[in-house]
Image (cartoon, rainbow, N blue to C red):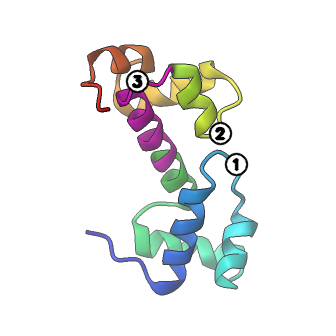
Amino acid sequence: FIRPSGQMTATLIYIAAHLNEDISINTLSALTAYHPHYFIKLFKQDMGMSPHQYILRMRLQEAARILRTGGTVSEAAASVGYADTSSFAREFKSHYGVQPGRFAQHSPHIP
């Protein structure tokens, strides 16, 4: 399990609350009061991946949750900040190995 430092915990909370927005490294580094380059280094040490990779993973996990609960592909894409469903579908398939529509059809719906 990953145990983020205190500074990273605030960053992770911010990311979770703003998944549908454009999240910049400058914004995240300002939360920790570190220089952006140093922030990226610390984030990688704490989380095992870059901030960009983490944000992408969290967005796709949230989208998968939305699809499992009966949401549409366009609803899932919009709720995690994708302007168009085609780029969302491409990222989703790259991560999960299946198109989001097929994922929604074959995932158990959770009320």
Marks 1 and 2 close (CB-CB < 8 Å): yes
Q: Is residue 110 magenta?
A: no
Q: Residue at x 51, y 44 (%)?
A: 59
Q: Could you tell me which quadrant the C terminus lies in?
A: top left
Q: Earlier in the sequence, mark 1 or mark 3?
A: 1
Magenta stretch: helix, strand or loop mostly: helix
Q: Mark 1 — residue? A: 21
Q: From the viewer's perspective, is 111 left or right of 44?
A: left
**Crowding near the residue tagged with mark 3, few <14, some 14–19, many ≥20 C-alpha atoms within 10 Å:** some
Find residue 97 and report its image quarter: top left
Instruction: State the image coordinates of residue 16 (x, y, percent, origin top left).
Output: 53, 58
**Mark seen at residue 81:** 2
Query: What's drawn in magenta, residue-wise?
Result: 58-72
Q: Residue at x 52, y 21 (%)?
A: 73
Q: Earlier in the sequence, mark 3 or mark 2?
A: 3
Mark closer to the observer (1, 3): 3
Q: Earlier in the sequence, mark 1 or mark 2?
A: 1
Q: Residue at x 41, y 42 (%)?
A: 61
Residue type marked 2:
Gly
Residue type marked 3:
Gly
Q: From the viewer's perspective, is 108 left or right of 56?
A: left
